[in-house]
């Protein structure tokens, strides 16, 4: 499973002897172009971190330790550790702040408290989820939502003061080419520009699906990702009341499709992505899988029922998928497969 190394941009404490130079221009990460403009005004007991949570999400963390004293430096390091421990893919910023608050309150005397702003950008939809604790020293605004001067921050409860504090969470839709401005006192101005449209648009278009559906889209890279995804989907369908027979058939179909995408589509290259699209309605269960390979022509596949192919160990995957599903179609250049289960089909309700 691929691991992600965070882009660390920390300026914590008054001791500047171990100061790490921060570049003025940062590399593009996941469809983001980031720049950092600095002045001679030093940051004290403050930190900034940009952390890719997965292929589809990036977290932006800005925090400041109070009061302004040398003890804030080790506390600042502990704060970063707490956030890293709590930040997970698909997490909610408000819940993360609450978890960090409990960790700090339980293990550190509340003499030192923390103000923080946490935002998570979803590259699939360009939704930005954010929450803040305390009165943050930075201003955060978007160039296009709803005006260039709107401040998205609100007063909140600082961390490590109230054990049961809750942190409201907000979500906004970021238009394409939006620029986010984040100013840390007078020391740094951080800008982040979206350099690509929402990824979901291209994926749904390739699958031939309408954009107004309620889809759960995940990015996978290897078999560990596949097994975690499969367990999550099977558990979800089990809670919906699907029969054991259907769950077994569903599991077989998804295993076959995603395995083909990883092994044959992407040739086992974990730097390439496998995109899964999942939708559940009252009438059907839909699943789409997209790989970054060259695709294939269904007509060129050997017939698994041909006597000469009966003893072959491979070549039955597509045949099995078609047998257990109610709809099967290839899209794009053959690197996208969409299948559908009809929930009203009696064969899915028996067993």
Image (tube, grey):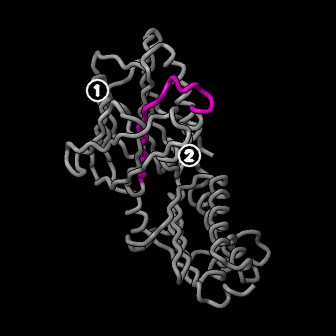
Quadrant of the rendered image containing residue 158:
top left
Q: Nearer the viewer, residue 63 or 162?
A: 162
Q: Is residue 110 magenta?
A: yes
Q: Is residue 217 left or right of residue 46?
A: right
Q: Is residue 206 above or below residue 266?
A: below
Residue in the image at 58% along x and 81% along y: 341
* SS under mark 2: loop
Q: Nearer the viewer, residue 129 or 222?
A: 129
Q: Nearer the viewer, residue 278 or 205?
A: 278
Residue in the image at 32% along x and 28% along y: 184
Q: Quadrant of the C terminus?
A: bottom right
Residue at the top extreme of this rendering: 17
Q: Find residue 156 and report its horizontal and vertical position in percent.
A: 40, 40
Quadrant of the rendered image containing residue 237:
bottom right
- Mark 2 vs mark 1, foreground winner is 2
Q: Which residues are magenta?
A: 105-123
Q: Find residue 286 and report its horizontal and vertical position in percent.
A: 53, 75
Number of other residues with Cα within 10 Å of mark 2, as a class: few under 14, some 14 to 19, many 20 or more: some
Q: Find residue 175 and report its horizontal and vertical position in percent.
A: 28, 54
Q: Which of the two labelled residues, at mark 2 and mark 1, occupies the earlier sequence position?
A: 1
Quadrant of the rendered image containing residue 232:
bottom right
Is residue 125 visible in the rendered structure shown here? yes
Q: Is residue 232 magenta?
A: no
Is residue 335 visible in the rendered structure shown here? no
Q: Which residue is mark 2?
A: 88
Number of other residues with Cα within 10 Å of mark 1, as a class: few under 14, some 14 to 19, many 20 or more: some
Q: Which mark is residue 37?
A: 1
Q: Find residue 66 and report its horizontal and vertical position in percent.
A: 44, 23
Q: Nearer the viewer, residue 157 or 9?
A: 157
* SS under mark 1: strand
Residue at the right extreme of this rendering: 311
Q: Are marks 2 and 1 in contact (CB under 8 Å)?
A: no
């Amino acid at each position: 499973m691929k691991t992600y190394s965070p882009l660390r941009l920390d300026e914590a404490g008054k001791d500047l002897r171990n100061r790490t130079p921060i570049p003025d221009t940062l590399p593009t990460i996941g469809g983001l172009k980031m720049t950092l403009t600095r002045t001679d005004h030093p940051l004290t007991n403050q930190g900034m971190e940009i952390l890719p949570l997965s292929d589809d999400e990036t977290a932006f963390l800005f925090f400041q330790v109070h009061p302004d004293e040398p003890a804030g430096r080790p506390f600042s390091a502990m704060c970063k550790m707490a956030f890293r421990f709590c930040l997970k893919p698909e997490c909610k910023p408000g819940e993360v702040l609450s978890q960090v608050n409990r960790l700090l309150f339980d293990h550190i005397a509340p003499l030192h408290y923390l103000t923080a702003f946490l935002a998570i950008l979803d590259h699939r939809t360009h939704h930005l989820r954010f929450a803040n604790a305390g009165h943050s020293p930075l201003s955060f605004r978007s160039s296009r939502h709803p005006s260039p001067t709107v401040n998205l921050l609100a007063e909140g409860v600082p961390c490590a003061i109230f054990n049961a504090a809750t942190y409201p969470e907000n979500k906004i839709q970021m238009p394409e080419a939006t620029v986010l401005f984040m100013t840390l006192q007078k020391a740094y101005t951080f800008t982040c520009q979206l350099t690509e449209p929402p990824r979901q648009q291209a994926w749904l278009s390739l699958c031939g699906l309408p954009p107004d559906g309620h889809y759960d889209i995940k990015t996978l890279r290897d078999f560990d990702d596949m097994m975690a995804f499969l367990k999550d989907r099977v558990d979800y369908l089990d809670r919906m009341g699907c029969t054991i027979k259907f769950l077994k058939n569903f599991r077989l179909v998804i295993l076959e499709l995603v395995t083909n995408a990883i092994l044959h589509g992407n040739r086992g290259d974990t730097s390439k992505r496998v995109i899964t699209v999942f939708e559940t309605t009252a009438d059907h269960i839909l699943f789409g899988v997209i790989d970054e390979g060259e695709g294939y022509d269904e007509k060129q596949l050997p017939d698994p029922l041909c006597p000469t192919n009966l003893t072959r160990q491979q070549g039955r995957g597509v045949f099995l998928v078609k047998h257990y599903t109610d709809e099967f179609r290839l899209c794009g250049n053959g690197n996208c497969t969409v299948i559908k289960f009809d929930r009203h089909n009696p064969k899915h309700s028996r067993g």
